Image (cartoon, helix red, strand yellow):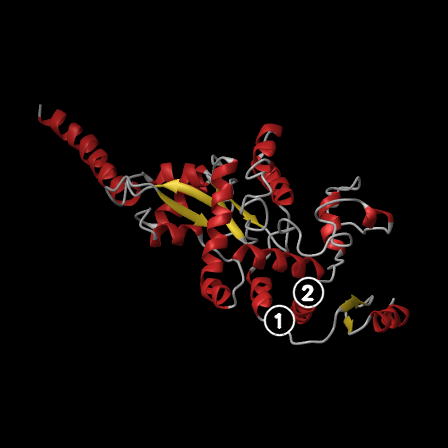
Amino acid sequence: MKKFLIFIGLIVIPVITLLILGWHYFGPPGKSMETQIFTVPEKQPDFDAVQSLSDGGFIRNTGAFSLLKEKLAKDKEVRPGGYYINQNMFAWQVLEKITGKPDLLWLTVTGCPRKEQIGEKLADLLGWTSKEIKDWNSLYSDFKSEYFEGVYYPDTYLIPVTESAGQIARRFIDRFNTKFAPLADKFVEADIKWTTGVKIASLIAREAAGDGDMRLISGIIWNRLDQGMRLQIDATMQYTLGKRPDGSWWGSVDIGEKQNDSPYNTYLYKGLPPTPICSPDIRYLEAVINPESTDCLYYLHDSGGQIHCAKTYTGHKSNIGKYL
């Protein structure tokens, strides 16, 4: 009997010890089952996922977790994105989660894109079906809707892979509202409707060759509007033409196309187009209410992107001869 008890002790005690140590190093670090997002940056080569998990209270011991990863997931990478985890998960559950498919994916939108362009990026990122693409493109499809175009703010987003087109659109619109909020009172003071401001900002964004000429182009657009002149901006016709056979959205516009009847044709019709033509960022919205004071009514960019403006059409033709 004594030998049996000794034998049991030699087995049970080490097992209990291992369980205690295992819990200490690999057990849940907390009791909260509240879902949190563990974020892996898109572009941070020095990002330490293990240390970040420790800092967030998701693992008990960095050394133990690194050992676990070496043994169980040596060849698996932790991809950029977001992962739903909580503090009541065991270390191996956390490891399995962060070496699997992300629950949220990074999306960066730059420039001044039209809604369909953003939809293409979302479709590539999320593997959308043709129906989901159609759902996105048909959002707020009435010209009279304030959200038809122009409010899908270009920025970096962490997109949940399960969100619908409508939910993702709200993310873009909410970001626009956040960015625009500091300017709202200034637009009211200048007696400019925010929808008008976004239209003008979108034209500036598509016409400017860089930050240096945004305010000048804004001043020229305002001059033309104030004098009742046609804006004659190619970008509005580019918007009307949509996607080209070569896959581009913003190709050149020939003389014949400038005669096509469209509410966006600023060669035929005075005033602003019925909607913005793309979604501008805050810099272009600021340029709308801070135009450069100028007598110019015409402008062009030379092959190097340098802007040249003129007060008269005669002066503009001279610039065409010099710089184009």
* Residue underneath mark 1: 291
Q: In the orientation shown, which residue stands out farthest toward the front?
A: 228
Q: Earlier in the sequence, mark 2 or mark 1?
A: 2
| Image spot of residue 30 (x, y percent) | 25, 44
Q: Is 64 displayed left or right of 238 in the figure?
A: left
* Neighbour tally class for label 1: few under 14, some 14-19, many 20 plus, Cα within 10 Å: some
Tell me which amino acid carries mark 1.
Pro
Regarding mark 1 in the picture, which secondary structure is present there? loop
Q: At 71% from the left edge and 60% from the top edge, which residue is drawn?
A: 207
**Near-viewer residue (304 or 268):** 268
Q: Residue at x 58, y 57 (%)?
A: 196
Q: Residue 33 in the image: state x and y as whole percent.
A: 28, 39
The circle drawn on residue 221 is 2
Q: Of all residues shown, which one is farthest toward the top?
A: 1
Tag 2–tag 1 contact (CB < 8 Å): yes
Classify mark 2: helix, strand or loop: helix
Amino acid type, residue under disc 2 in the picture:
Ile
